[in-house]
Image: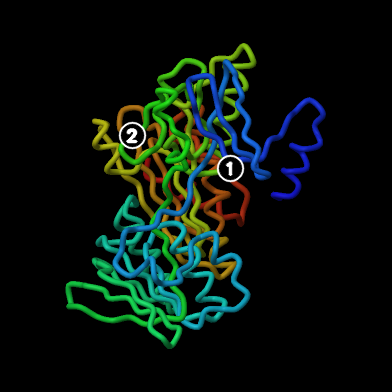
Amino acid sequence: MRALNLKNFTSLPSLDFILGTGRFLGPQLVEVALTDGVVRQLTSKRIFIDTGTRPAIPDLPGLSDTPFLTSDRIQRLDALPSRLLVLGAGYIGLEFAQMMQRFGSEVAVFERGGQILSHEDPEIAEVLANCLQREGVQIELNATVEQVCNPSNGQVEVTVQTPRGKREWVGSHLLVALGRFPVTKDLDLPAAGVETDGKGFINVNDRLETNVPGIWAIGDVNGGPQFTHASLDDFRILRDNVFGTGSRSRADRYVPSTLFTDPELAHVGLRENEAVAHGFNIRVLQVPITALTVPRARTSGQMDGVLKATIEQSTERILGCTILAAEAGEMIGTVQALMMTQRPATMLRDAVLSHPTMVEGLNALFASL
């Protein structure tokens, strides 16, 4: 895909593709150091920053002297880790943990919080954790990694403090999966007057404009949802607002997320605690994946999971929905479509949905309305 995209850039006769490292010299002036050593200065009244993010590397004693994997490096392994230690129980950590466990590695995951997926509703996180542990993935919660070292035998040792005490863990490989940070440090944004937040993400409004006229920031670097589909919508906002006649905004968009474990975990809208924090009077609906709620789960042998929705009491509109189930990433689109129309959840309760499919479970989820 990278080769295809590069060809698309370099083959357009009307596009100058310049490969190098850029930094701001002023609001409309950029200096680019090319890979062949040549330095160029470019000016424009319109500049779009789309530099993305990189894996976050913690300031952990011993880590700089220890070979470790990131979400990039682990994909270039030519041999299977015999024992993989994973720092972080977020999306990246859990996807690779289950993947490597199924490939045949022994896997242990360390999470400093009290649950995996710290932003997720606790009961959802617990069900997924149980699924992973049943497969053999070890999960250590409330685990503070104090030190990493690389002994002479080529192994990796991790010192972890837990409520049960301190313990040394030994593995063949270490995966650091503690989120991502923005690629802004070397852009010299102060030279252009572009403001960032405390983590380095570029501040933008809902039209993706920075505080400097003529400069926009799109994709992961602006601190929005770090998903390819969100970045694609950022492009559409710019296309219509800057180069078209539209008035698009990210303020009213619903951005779904999907964690590609098995079962998948998909979400859109507000979670229960977020809806309460926004002041909504809510009703929470929740059903487990069973042969009765989702007959397709029985026929496919994929019975793990739960369906959950947060409903506004007065309007019966869906404020948010979380699906932990096989094909959850496909199912969430049906809920998202209804949310975009601002119609009540009773429409899904009464909808004639194809049998037997996973989406049929939405009839059961909203049956009590």
Question: Label 2's element?
Answer: loop
| Residue 298 picture location, percent across and down | 54, 67
Q: Residues within 10 Å of mark 1 (few under 14, many from 20)?
A: few
| Residue 65 picture location, percent across and down | 39, 70
Write down the quadrant of residue 22 in the picture.
top right
Residue at the spot 27% in from the left edge and 76% down from the top edge: 159
Q: Residue furthest bottom?
A: 153
- Total number of numbered discs in the rendering: 2
User: What residue did someone put label 2 on?
Assistant: 197
Residue at the spot 59% in from the left edge and 67% down from the top edge: 299
> Which of disc 1 and disc 2 is earlier in sequence?
2
Hey, what amino acid is under mark 2? Asp
| 311 left or right, relative to 362 | left
| 320 left or right, relative to 42 | left
User: What residue did someone put label 1 on?
Assistant: 352
Question: Label 1's element?
Answer: loop
Q: Nearer the viewer, residue 112 or 152?
A: 152
The figure's colour scheme reads rainbow
Residue at the spot 29% in from the left edge and 61% down from the top edge: 115
Above/below status of 367 relative to 174: above
Position of the C terminus by quadrant: top left
| Number of the front mark, 2 or 1 | 2
Q: Nearer the viewer, residue 141 or 174?
A: 174
| Residue 221 picture location, percent across and down | 47, 38
Hey, what amino acid is under mark 1? Val
Q: Residues within 10 Å of mark 2 (few under 14, many from 20)?
A: few
Above/below status of 94 relative to 257: below
Cβ–Cβ below 8 Å for labels 2 and 1?
Answer: no
